[in-house]
Amino acid sequence: MGHGAADPPSPTARLARVRNTGLGAALVATGILASRIAGLVRQRVFTHYLGVSDAADAFAFAFRVPNLLQNLLGEGVLSATFVPVYAGLLARHDEAEAGRVAGAVAAILALGMSALVLVGVLAAPALVAVLAPGFPAEKQALATSLVRILFPGAALLALSAWALGILNSHGRFLWSYLAPVAWNAAMIAALLGWGERTGPDALVRIVAWGSVAGSALQLAVQLPGVLLLCRTLRLSFDARREGVRATFRSFGPVVAGRGVTQLSGWLDAVLASLVAPGAVAAMGYAQLLYMLPVSLFGMSVSAAELPAMASEFGEADAVAAALRGRLRTALGRVAYFVVPSAVAFLALGGHVVALVYQGGRFTAADARWVWAILAGSAIGLVAGTMGRLYASAWYALRQPRVPMRVALLRVGLTLAFGLLLAFPVRSALGLAAMWGVAGLTAGAGLAAIVEFLMLRRSLAARIGDVRVSAGSLLRLWGMAGVSAGAALGVAALLPGSGPVVRALLTLGTYGAAYLLLTAAAGVAEANALVARLRRR
């Protein structure tokens, strides 16, 4: 997806492309798929050399600390605050003002991130002591050194998210979501280059430096496109412009909403550090798999829809009708792909985990543990993914406080459900302590369901009810269940095959059966997918 030497299209032409959100979502999904595959390769190599060792545990924890900063001020926040303002200016043909706003946001963001990185590096020992109370002293010392290495990379990734927002607003979805491949490649190179030559502690430090280098590469590959498309970009600290003020007015509620969501994940990590050795790493391995359908089918659709929804203006009734139409189509698309993903994690998760991770120091017993954690996460997968679309609609309406308030409730419920399932319920069932991590993820899934229901109800009061019918959802769940049964039958016929071969045949059977069943049932998304496959 390169840019030629010719002048870029006008803002009006670019916004016309943005409105084709079906194509936009496909491009985002393609980019995300490539980056997630690179991420899975990275994690596969990582587990080969480090398994669920203490060094892997320390790295998994340390990676979350600066990643919290990137998540708070990165793609999700800038998509909710900066993209609606920037895309709105393009829709009104004010490209000059859009460039000034983009430059001011970039400069202020860079300054703020620099200050936060300095604080994070200095406060690393205290952060590790508070957030990983279950780590012994030696592991805490390793985690502290890793946090200090990784923090600058978080600042670079936040600036990369600013570049992504500009590219998305101009309809350049593919390149912006391919950029993380460079970040993953740098870490893979570090692992392959030093994996056989160093011990675990030294290796994770080298990988941390590889992550920082990859963050710089991820930003660097996006900047040429940004400069070509946003020719009026001017860096400044001018916070008086209305677009800059509008962006940062929304920052507080959005950061708070993202913050409480991140707090929920941190509470899980803190509790996991108390459950069993290796639990933080195991949860991280499961989360990478869980995020694959969320990214491919939730984030891709949301990322493509947000600039288009933010570009809608006019009478309130007309805007509400346009949002309902977009959401209805997007929700159906998400449900078609995410429902079978949830069923796969529940019924076939062992094969998924074995395919991606098993080998080297990652054993079959480790695979069963990660499967249990993944199955807990699957409980709220569909609701959590659809909830992203409802939250995006609120951001497009410049009402970020609604998702923030609902996210606050979700955190409280995640903690309550997680504590209940991970400790007293798990103990009452006579399960080993290590299985309490699955209780934590199941609790988070239940909280995601509550959040989804509240977001849907609140949005219905604003623009009218938009949902996928219960009958359509039940039909998808039923066909996914039948497909899983067929896949398990194939797995039963292959008892002597290796885990990778068995996983490929089992999961391939599952995907083919689901596609055939849904196409035969006349599901619109299946018919569209079959038509695209036939054209190829």
Image: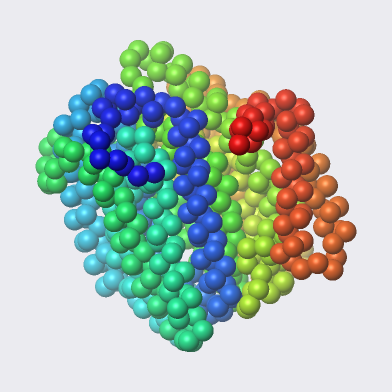
Residue in the image at 45% along x and 78% along y: 193
Question: Is 369 positioned to the left or the right of 454 in the image?
Answer: right
Question: Which image quadrant: the C terminus?
Answer: top right
Q: Nearer the viewer, residue 91 or 452?
A: 91
Rendering colour mode: rainbow
Quadrant in which residue 52 is drawn: bottom right
Q: Residue at x 26, y 27 (%)?
A: 10
- Foreground: 5 or 150? 5
Q: Position of residue 184 (x, y in %)?
A: 44, 62
Q: Nearer the viewer, residue 240 or 41?
A: 41
**17 left or right, relative to 474:** left
- Rendered-image quadrant of the N terminus: top left
| Furthest-right residue in this view | 493
Q: Residue at x 33, y 67 (%)?
A: 213
Q: Nearer the viewer, residue 173 or 455?
A: 173
Q: Is residue 461 above or below residue 129?
A: above
Query: How many numbered circles are shown?
Result: 0
Residue 257 position within the rendered picture, expressed as x and y whole percent measured from the top left: 40, 45
Q: Position of residue 93 (x, y in %)?
A: 23, 24
Q: Is residue 139 visible?
A: no
Q: Position of residue 78 (x, y in %)?
A: 33, 44
Residue, x 44% and y 71% (percent of image)?
Answer: 189
Is residue 164 among the parts visible in the rendering? yes
Q: Is residue 428 left or right of residue 117?
A: right
Can you tell which quarter of the image residue 315 is in?
top left
11 is higher (above) or lower (below) than 444: above
